Amino acid sequence: MIRKILFLTTILAQPAFAETPGIEKDELTLGFIKLTDMAPLAIAKEKGFFEEEGLYVTLEAQANWKVLLDRVIAGELDGAHMLAGQPIAASIGYGTEAKIITPFSMDLNGNGITVSNDVWALMKENIATDADGRPQHPISAAALKPVIEEYKAEGKPFNMGMVFPVSTHNYELRYWLAAGGINPGFYSPEDVSGQIGAEAYLSVTPPPQMPATLEAGTIDGYAVGEPWNQQAVLKGIGVPVITDYEIWKNNPEKVFGLTASFAEDNPNTVLALTKALIRAAIWLDENDNANRAEAVEILSRPEYVGADPGVIANSMTGTFEYEKGDKRDVPDFNVFFRYNATFPYYSDAVWYLTQMRRWGQIAEDQPDAWYDATAKEVYRPDLYKAAAEAVIADGNASADMFDFDADGYRMATPAADVIDGMGYDGTKPNAYIDSLTIGLKSGQTVANGAVIN
């Protein structure tokens, strides 16, 4: 109560703002993992957007993605920065079963794939160079295939880290490997390792531990969000070979997740939360990323990402460093608002479901209508639109900044925007799955350690 009195006293001399009326729960605890893309939460707090919407928010870093999800389900956290695959997987009962929704997508892009220095030295033999002698990007996993074959001939497994079985990083790493002719392995109901038939063995490592695990030699490479690819460059222990922007231009990334029951019981609280997050995303991208330097300083604080500001700035300010000294312009490496980044499109959810089916996490075929219905259980553009309209009514945005004509599906991704040249149409998930070279096709399952037709 003292905190609220002090806050109200402070704002008496400030311009009025339109606090969301009828908030059911105004003191909230929200979770996050120490990654650059938690930025909308940190900015909403530090720039006062939560308070202006009538919310008093505590942000708590979590040890790993499983702990974060379990605490949201248990009600210990009111919501959290989540892997997009987490609420989707929970809704279909893969892993932890729960009804989680998202009214807000947190970002596009933001991930990379890094390999050890030794692996990079071997890969470079298979990579063309440009006029300046630098490796030509994007780098295909085909350059890694001979390295994996060499490991196999020597009787050594090729191990790679990803952050969670239903993470974007897992699916992006698998996508990149498969596009280069490398089988990343399958899941089955009996074997959830994801390593059935694998040529590269993928396993879980929490994001902040990736560089140390690589340096120890436990893994030969990894897929992770920032700043943990750039940390490998700073430490001189590895080289990021590709960003997810190069795998799939403007791909969906994290979401803000909360239980369906919390949203039902606290609709005005969810409205206020979503409004604050929209405002934070606008701030992060406005004026051609003019606020990114300030965002870097905020994120570098120990209570948020806690990494060196220079490491965060390497990607957050529109560049990305591959080999040490090979820094290139990637203005859209982190996108928080433009390109309708915050809109929770059904097609984004459908893509995650297609990858779950492709690799056996969804064991049996499902009709296209099932993908649509499942996406609509989790992604809530209706809640987003209500918040966006309220932000506009408050004078904090204009209508032309939003995709109010959306039917919930993005326009199909053109083939030119994907590394394997396979376009994506979220309204035709089974046709998309069958178009991909490596992975389960219609009628196939995984049983007894093999793909069964």
Image: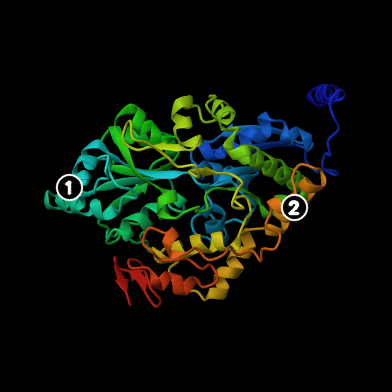
* Placement of 83 over or under 324, stated as above or below: below
Please state the horizontal and vertical placement of residue 162, each as a whole percent of the image: 39, 46
Does residue 248 appear in the picture of this structure?
Answer: yes
Q: Residues within 10 Å of mark 1 (few under 14, many from 20)?
A: few
Please state the horizontal and vertical placement of residue 43, each as a whole percent of the image: 64, 34
Frontmost residue, 81 versus 108: 108
Frontmost residue, 92 versus 44: 44
| Residue situated furthest left in the rendering | 154
Frontmost residue, 321 versus 26: 321
Q: Which mark is residue 18?
A: none
The answer to whether 58 appears left or right of 211 in the picture is right
Amino acid type at mark 2: Ala
Distance in Å between CA atoms under marks 1 and 2: 57 Å
Q: Which mark is residue 156?
A: 1
Please state the horizontal and vertical placement of residue 2, each as a whole percent of the image: 81, 22
Residue drawn where x is 44% and y is 29% of the image: 311
Q: Give SS at disc 2.
A: helix
From the image, which quarter does the N terminus lie in?
Answer: top right
Q: Residues within 10 Å of mark 2 (few under 14, many from 20)?
A: few
Residue drawn where x is 40% and y is 66% of the image: 422
Residue drawn where x is 24% and y is 52% of the image: 143
- Choose top left, top right, bottom left or bottom right for residue 212: top left
Please state the horizontal and vertical placement of residue 148, each as a whole percent of the image: 20, 51
Identify the residue position indicated by label 2 in the image.
399
How many numbered dots are placed on residues in this image?
2
| Residue situated furthest front in the rendering | 131
Amino acid type at mark 1: Lys
